[in-house]
Image: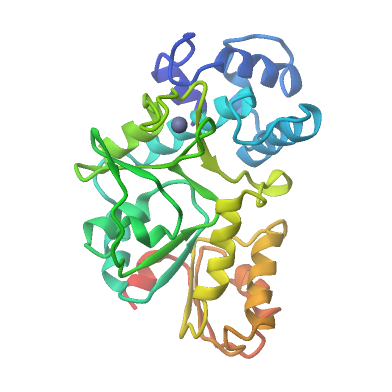
Amino acid sequence: MASKVIDHYPLLGYSGPVHGLDHFLRDLNTVYGQSRSEDSIDVLNMKDISLERVMTYYYMRHEIMELGLDFFEPAGARVRTLNNLLAFVITESIMGDTCRKHLRLAKRMGKGDVILNFNYDFLMDDALYNAGKFLDSGYVMRFDYTKIDEEWKRVREGPSQVTMLKLHGSLNWVRCSNCGRNLLLRSEESLSALCNAARVMGEKCPKCRSIWLYGLGRIIVPPFVGKNLKDTDIKYLWNRALDLSEDIERMVVIGYRFSEFDYETDMLLREMIHNQVTSPDVPIDIINPDARSVASRFRSMYRKSPITLFDSLDSYLDS
Ligand SMILES: [Zn+2]
């Protein structure tokens, strides 16, 4: 899909929103392809290339080979290009009206519900906003400013019915590396307006006026071994996830594959048991086309839990 997006938008220009895409493609063609082309996108369609693999490569290279540079610093040029391309691809795939299934799911949620969300997109956030069940404070993340449609505002805290911890960050979360402010982009207009804001990032930091190229970067935790969970704000979310899981009555696992490399999720779930915040026989619903293999991961921890399997979100919503 990335190649279609690059084909569709004029992304290769110097001042375009995915700055540095030419050098990014050259690296990718050199490492995975057979050329040093700066505009050939065929490499993105190769079978043995996956998002996880490419992200891990660039993040590890940045962490290990580009010494002394922080993950979210603008100096990690390829990482920034990758994340901006990722924003383009993901937002392209979710543009339009709010998803009907997410809205139905949002309607089922209520006061006190806690979502541990590992997705970079904001489909669930948008559905909960629309259902009137979610406010910025529900992220638990420290935001200094919120950009609502065209205007920067100071964050207004208020009680949110639903709490959503986005443990891998989010495409609409931005940090200014010059002044350290955390910024939240959102829209009351439409999901498409939010997608546009999140992918183009034509913003300036409302505090120090840094532009995205030199100061603003996305707050995203990469997959697999390159994970940066030492980031103070992200670490705080993981700790809150443990506190907020106290006395949960039911665990609902939607679309989460629980790969064998998700060591930190495994750790978090075991910490819930270790600290006795979650009952070892808490009922668990698993919604996944491959629900059985996900269930076996949970079964290894929650041995007494009744586990109900659903092979699609529709079958769960109809239950
Ligand atoms: Zn700033």
154 vs 135: above or below = above
Give x and y (percent) for residue 241. Answer: 54, 68
Q: Identify the image quadrant of residue 67.
A: top right
Return the residue nearer the eye: 236 or 31. 236
Return the residue nearer the eye: 131 or 178. 178
Give x and y (percent) for residue 173. Answer: 44, 43
The answer to whether any part of residue 77 appears in the image is: yes
The answer to whether any part of residue 296 appears in the image is: no
Q: Is residue 92 left or right of residue 290?
A: left
Residue pictured at 44% horizontal, 38% vertical: 90
Return the residue nearer the eye: 7 or 158. 158
27 vs 89: above or below = above
Residue pictured at 58% horizontal, 90% vertical: 281
Return the residue nearer the eye: 194 or 107. 194
Give x and y (percent) for residue 6. Answer: 47, 20
Q: Is residue 273 left or right of residue 7?
A: right
